[in-house]
Amino acid sequence: MLTKSNKNMTTKTYQRIKLFLTMLISIVVSTSIIHQNFFIPAITLVASFLVLLFLRKKVEQVISDERDILNGGKSALMAIQIYSWIAVISMLLLYSLQGYNPNYEAVALTLAFSTCILMLVYSAIFYYYNKMQLTNSRSLYLIGVIIIFLFLSIFMLRVFSGEDSWMCENGKWIEHGHPSYPAPNKECK
């Protein structure tokens, strides 16, 4: 029969397992990208997350204290603000240079939408922790946010997937799918 000390693990052991899983994920992701397989890294990330979630419950010591949580919150807010400013400035710059390379527009739009999604997710989570934590409707709120996020993800994948667009090949604009707009009037290089 196992004693209580054998069932639980120390923070040091947990950190070592976390480091090993991080190295494993980096190896799997880099190898999968080389082989153009994106399904395996997704499964690896989900499996690693679940393993760490399970093991975190087995740690008997304090993993983080209130100071760590406060500093983490400040760091996350600062990272979001810095990313947002860099993304917006880069988006404006790339959008203004789309005449030189039409691909800059796609990158600019990706930056713009990723920044908007980041801000929406941050606002939803902040609202959840600020208002909903004290009420009984937080489960309903969380389910609603997940449904909205999934709907927006599917919508954005469909609208911005580039399936129905114009592609530049050998100096001519070629239909890709069935675009609902005429070929660009810019020179195709």
Image (tube, helix red, strand yellow):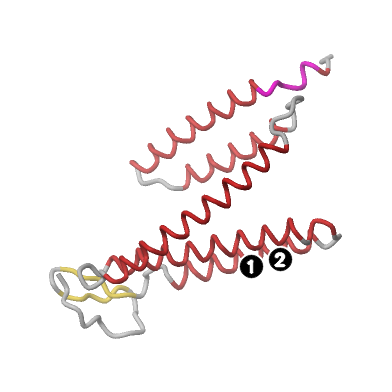
**Is 134 rendered above or below residue 188?**
above
**What numbered label is drawn on residue 148?**
1
Q: Are marks 1 and 2 in contact (CB under 8 Å)?
A: yes
- The C terminus: image quadrant: bottom left
- The N terminus: image quadrant: top right
26 displayed left or right of 5:
left
7 displayed left or right of 174:
right
**Is 185 rendered above or below residue 21?**
below
Can you identify the residue that label 2 sits on?
144
Disc 1 marks a residue whose amino acid type is: Ile
Residue 173 location (% of width, % of height): 20, 76
Please give the range of residues in magenta.
Answer: 5-11
Q: Viewer-proximal residue, 50 or 106? A: 106
Q: Secondary structure at mark 1?
A: helix
Residue at screen point 74% across, 29% down: 62
82 displayed left or right of 97:
right
Give the Cα distance between marks 1 and 2. Answer: 6 Å
Residue 79 location (% of width, % of height): 51, 50
Q: Residue furthest right?
A: 136
Q: Quadrant of residue 182?
A: bottom left
Residue at screen point 44% across, 36% down: 28
